[in-house]
Each structure stands twice: as structure tokens, then as C-alpha cells.
Amino acid sequence: MTKTTIKRKLDKLFSEYIRSRGYCIKCKKLDNLQCCHIFSRSNMSVRWDIDNLLSMCAGCHFFAHKNPILFTEFVREYLGAERYEQLKVRARAIKQWKLDEMVEFYEAMKIALKERCI
């Protein structure tokens, strides 16, 4: 397995995991859910950090990207100031995942998702 392959698998798994919350955290809609990253997926330190991922409907996700200041205010309120600041610090960290780390993390999250859906 390559890093690219496991990265795609992790992205898919986390998207499924986050969307399994079942509703948009902003408007509470139940359909057309997407996995929204607070800090970009390019920030590998928080790419698969549960605090960095939100379940949002397509409309709210689009709104978030078009209105970053309002989105930041919403996220800060949603997470709370302290949790948001901690996430921001983690997002600034440089993380280079090793293949074996990614595979181990993937296996652990598969189990977590399965337990969550039961």
C-alpha cells in the first residue's frame, strides 16, 4: 500500500465517520451531508483531527467557503474559544505521516466507525 492510497482511504473513512453524525451542525438538515474541514486538508497535522471536521450540508459548506470570517466566528462559538485555539495551534504544526502510522491509524478508525454505527 502506498501513502497516496492510504491517504485516500483515510479521507473516505473520515468523511463517512463525520457524516454519520447524521445532520448539519449549522442548520440541522439531514440530507446532502459533506465533511467540512475547518483548517485545510493540506494541514496534515489536523487533516484527520475530529475537532477539525464538521458535518455540514452542501449549502452551509458552500456558505462557509464564501464567508470565511463568519465561518470562523461560527466555529469558534461551536467549539468554544479554548478548543478552537488548541486546534489552531495543532493546525500550525508540521506533520509528516509515516506509512505505518497511517495504516495503524486507518485500522483504528475503521473499528471506531464500526462501533459508532452499531
Image (cartoon, grey):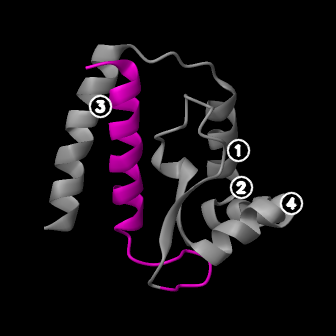
- Label placed on residue 116: none
Q: Residue placed at 83% from the left, 67% from the top?
A: 70
Q: Is residue 104 magenta?
A: no
Which circle, 3 or 1, is nearer the viewer? 3
Q: Depth check: 72 or 9 in front?
A: 9
Image-quadrant location for residue 107: top left
Q: Is residue 72 visible?
A: yes
Which quadrant, please, contains the C terminus?
A: bottom left
Q: Secondary structure at mark 4?
A: helix
What type is the residue that disc 3 sits on? Phe
Residue extent of the magenta highlight: 1-29
Q: Secondary structure at mark 1?
A: helix
- Label placed on residue 105: 3
Q: Residue placed at 82% from the left, 64% from the top?
A: 66
Q: For marks 4 and 1, give the CA distance.
A: 15 Å
- Label placed on residue 85: 1
Residue that label 4 marks: 69
Tell me whether the residue at label 4 lies in contact with that at label 3, contact meaning CB atoms closer than 8 angstroms.
Answer: no
Q: Residues within 10 Å of mark 1 (few under 14, many from 20)?
A: few
Q: Residue placed at 41% from the left, 25% from the top?
A: 4
Say left or right for 58 vs 81. Answer: left
Which circle, 4 or 1, is nearer the viewer? 4
Q: For marks 3 and 1, give the CA distance.
A: 24 Å
Which circle, 2 or 4, is nearer the viewer? 4
Say left or right for 66 vs 36. Answer: right
What type is the residue that disc 1 sits on? Glu
| First reached walking from the N terminus: tag 3 or tag 1 | 1
Q: For marks 2 and 4, give the CA distance.
A: 15 Å
Q: Depth check: 73 or 61 in front?
A: 61
Q: For marks 4 and 3, give the CA distance.
A: 32 Å
Q: Residue 90 in the image: x percent, y percent?
A: 61, 32
